Every structure is written in C-alpha cells, then in structure tokens.
Image: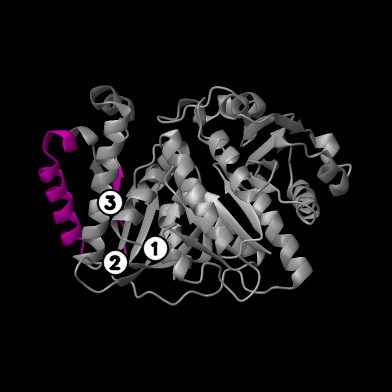
Amino acid sequence: MRLGAVADDVTGACDLAGRVAEAGLPASVLLTASADAADAAVFPGDGSGCAVVALKVRTAPVAEAVDASTAAARLLLSAGATQLYQKYCSTFDSTPSGNIGPIADALLDVAGATASVGTPATPGAGRTQYQGVLFVDGVPLAESPMRDHPLTPMRDSNLVRLLAPQTRAPVGLMRWEDVHRGSATVAAAIADGHTLVDALTAQDLDLIAAAVRERAADTPILAGGGAGVATALARAEVRESGVAGGAAGLPPVPVTGRLILAGSASAATRAQLAAFRGERHVLDPRELDRDADAALARLRDALAAHDDRRSPLLIHASPEVAAAQEALGAARAAALLEDALAELAAVAVHEFEYSHLLIAGGETSGAVTARLGIARLRIGTQAAPGVPWAVAASAAPGGEDRTIAVLLKSGNFGGPALFDDAWEVAP
C-alpha cells in the first residue's frame, strides 16, 4: 500500500506521518504540491510507504482550500498512491461552511469514489467518538477548551450535525455496536456519501482499517479523519506485507542553537509555557502593529545575545489573546504573529545558525516552514505522541541550504514538560 494523505495543516501532517512511521511504515511530509515535487520520489522506500502533503487550508477560504487539496491529491495519485486519505484535525476544527466537508467532496471526485469513511478518533491523543459525539480527553468537544478556540470555536459535539451543513453529500453514522460486528459488516454498511464511525480504542480503528482495505479491493474509497485510522492502515500493511522501515534513524544535526517559537493559544501549549524555566521573550501583536521593526529588532538582539546554544530560547505569543483580537481583529492579530515568528525563524537559522527549532501551533508551523523554504520533511522519532522530530533543508536566499532539525507541534499536543524534554530524542 502506498498511503497518500492530504493534510489541512503542517502539524497535522507531522502527527500522521510520525504515528505511521512509528507503526513501521516509512513516511515523509511534502510541503508543496508543485510540479517540482512530482519530479522527486514522492513516496519513501521501494514499496509500501506513506507520503503526506501538508497544506495550510484549515481556515482558508473554501474555494482556496478545495483547489489546494485537489492539487495535492492529484500529485499523490500520479505518484502511485493506492489509498487516498483526508487528514483533518482530531478536534474537527471547522466552521459551518467548511473546510472538512468541501474538501471531502472534492477528494471523492479526484479519487473516483462515491463513499468516504473515517473518524477523528485518535485514542492515543485522547480523542474518541461515541454515538457520533467527539470526546476530547473524556470531555465532549463543546465542553473542552476547543469551545473557545480563537479561530474555530467548536460549540457542538455531534459530528453528524457539524459535517452535514458543509457537504453536498449525505452524512451517515456507524455506531460503536455495529463496528464490533466485524470488518466485513463495516465494509458492507458503508454507504455513498460520508460515513463517520465511532471508535474508542486502537482495536476499533483496526476494524475500520480492515473494512477500508476490504472495500478498496473492489472499488475506490476515500479514508479520512485524524491520524488514528491512518495509523491502523499502516499497522495492517506492516503485518501483511512485512515492510520494515518506519521512523528510521535520521542523520545527526550538530547542535548550534535551540529555539522554541510558540504561536498557539491552546491549553496544552499554555501548560508547556507555564512549565518552561529557560530564557523567554513575549511577542504581542499590538506591539507589532505599533512598530513591527522595533519589535523584531528587540527579538533579533535576543537571538544574537543567547550564548548557551544548548539551552533553548523561547519566543512566544502574548497570553492576552482576547485583548489583542479585540484591538486588531482576530485575522490581523494572527497574521502579524505568524509573519513575525516566521521572520524570526529565518533570522535564527540563516543569520545566527540555530540548528534545532521547536514550533508550537499549526498556523505558526505553516508560516515558518514556508518562510524557511522547506519542501520536504524526513520523519524521525516522536518526542510525544503525534509530535515527531524531522530533518529538513532550509533554503537560504542567494546562499547554500542549511540542514536543520524541526519539531512541528499541534497546539493541543504534548505534555507540560515537552519544551524541556523534546531535545533528548532530537536528531
């Protein structure tokens, strides 16, 4: 099996690739769906493997998100993907108009399929689905911290109700009791349109993956969800084909500087910020709005003055998110932060030769990787579930590429000590 996944953001792509690689299937992440990428070997390994195209479309306008996702899917299929996968956030981040539903509709067309099946459930990350309700660490989605997410506040926990307004296709639910009747029953019950499947355990995901493989043997099907079903597909492929690879050792990257850039306001990232005891600097979008040059100069000086390069330096967004959004508007506040953090990453890597970057937040990760000109991530060991280290080449304008180690973290992932402990397994 060659699993080709279209991910709606960079950290989601790394989440999927990291878990798939840990299951034993070689994986890489592409940060472009351009023609240049098609000229390279898209899938790692000689046989089975996983390639994930990381987009930045979770909160993009619907038409833009659909166009980018369609281009990515076509690239993967032209490179030999045998199973197409739509990766969306395990907390189902979306709005009433999209983007999960419109992308799913478009990928059905590209795959030549009439049915999709999946679930955001990823039990290893505390995401489960029961009776169509998504739970986050045991709490219904609408009662979790996602209720007050600054960009995609989730005020309903019922996935069928959330998805139905976004799509032109019917939306069905396969309940947990039906999943346990076996993969053949699941495969036979998948109807045209989009079927969301309850899952509480890794064994449930294995049954869903088996149903996808059985159905795909006869007719194309679109799989999707969080990283859970993709990981189960990888486990099945490793068992049946005996492929060996996964999170292969990455080339060592000499430590010449460690930097944490955190743009996320998620609860897990806030806990990581609170636990971190190293040098830190705060960046407020209101400061950037008043005088961006002065704000960046202040932090550039901090990068230059940081002498103990094995000790991580942290630059993070101000916790006063609501005040900044009220003053500037949510979109402008986010754009100012993303642009500034991306510029600081480029300064750190290409001017001060920082070698290891830990980036917290999906939108921030997308902005940073774009600014660094990174085209591909070689996936390595996970520092936490869904949070793998990777090695990449950063393109320097007018100069030589630099090999760096990067960890791109969803705002919701990782324990409180991640900012201190992640370096222990870094390449």
Assign a secondary structure to mark 1.
Answer: loop
The three-letter code of the residue at mark 2 reads Ala
Q: Quadrant of the C terminus?
A: bottom left
Residue shown at 24% from the left, 59% from the top:
346
311 left or right of 299? right
Disc nearest the viewer among 2 and 3: 2
> Is residue 56 or residue 285 the one in the foreground?
56
The three-letter code of the residue at mark 1 reads Ala
Q: Is residue 257 above or below residue 261?
A: below
Residue shown at 74% from the left, 31% from the top:
173
Query: Is most of the magenta stretch helix, strand or loop?
Result: helix
Report the residue marked by disc 3.
342
246 left or right of 408? right
Residue 80 visible: yes
Looking at marks 2 and 3 on the same chain, the residue that comes earlier in the sequence is marked by 3
Question: In the rendered structure, which segment of residues is drawn in magenta?
Answer: 287-316
Residue shown at 65% from the left, 31% from the top:
169
Report the residue marked by disc 2.
395
Q: Are marks 1 and 2 in contact (CB under 8 Å)?
A: yes
Q: Is residue 107 above or below residue 154?
A: below
Q: Quadrant of the N terminus?
A: bottom right
Q: Residues within 10 Å of mark 2 (few under 14, many from 20)?
A: some
The answer for how far apart the CA atoms under marks 1 and 2 are is 9 Å
Q: Residues within 10 Å of mark 1 (few under 14, many from 20)?
A: many
Report the residue marked by disc 1.
375
Looking at marks 1 and 2 on the same chain, the residue that comes earlier in the sequence is marked by 1
> Is residue 378 or residue 61 the one in the foreground?
61
Q: Is residue 356 above or below residue 313?
A: below
Residue shown at 27% from the left, 32% from the top:
332
